Image (cartoon, grey):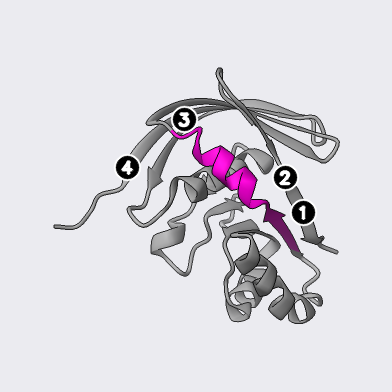
Amino acid sequence: MALKAKIHRVQLQVADMERHYYAEHGLTVAQHPSETDGRMMLRLLAFARHADESLAFGRGVSTEDEPDLWLKDLTGAIEHWIQLGQPDEKSVRRACARAGQVTLYTYGGNAAELWWEQNAGRLAALDNLTVVDVAPRSVEALAELVDRSMTLNCTLQDGMTWMTTPERSVDVALTWRKQRG
């Protein structure tokens, strides 16, 4: 018998002082059976960091041709492709060719570091690519916030990111490995 996705209901309030974006999003997030709590929370973090009324979750884990999140314009053209993990160089290049902007969130500590060392030179020429690494302790702390029904607040200010629930707060440690343009 195939395992089914867990469904999480999320009320996400975003206060992005850098973009002057303030909104509340009611989200239904499906957690693939193979997806860890930490990775699912990274998808929510990425959503909050790039929040927009048109930002949508892709099929991500279950589909290679779609990102974890994407923002499309009214014609269906992909404005922003957001992916998690350490994809192969070919996948990153394909995403950069398909979208105006690509943001890749790496995680996994040493594995992410090794991936970056192996790919940094080849990815340097991709002007529309941003690579951000999420510290392992942040992924672990975010995973502790998981519940079937969540109320989350995400605050972005002066390059810092905080994800909070009514009971806990996580200061998310991010390292920019490459910035677009």
Amino acid type of the residue tagged 4 in the rendering: Lys
User: Mark 3, residues whose alpha carbon is within 10 Å: few (<14), some, or many (≥20)?
Assistant: some
- Viewer-nearest of labels 3 and 1? 1
CB of mark 1 within 8 Å of CB of mark 2? Answer: yes
Query: Which residue is label 4 attached to?
Result: 6
- Tag 2, which secondary structure? loop
Q: Is residue 19 left or right of residue 162?
A: right
Looking at the rendered structure, which numbered label has been put on residue 173? 2
N-terminal-most mark, 1 or 4 = 4
Q: What segment carries the magenta color?
A: 130-146
Q: Residue at x 59, y 50 (%)?
A: 74
Tell me the CA gap for discs 3 and 4: 13 Å
Measured from the top left, where is residue 124 in percent x and y? 80, 75
Tell me the CA gap for discs 3 and 2: 22 Å
- Tag 3, which secondary structure? strand
Q: Residue furthest left?
A: 1
Amino acid type of the residue tagged 3 in the rendering: Val
In the rendered image of this protein, does residue 170 appear above or below residue 151?
Answer: below
Query: Which residue is label 3 attached to?
Result: 10
Tell me the CA gap for discs 1 and 2: 7 Å
Amino acid type of the residue tagged 1 in the rendering: Thr
Query: Which residue is label 1 attached to?
Result: 175
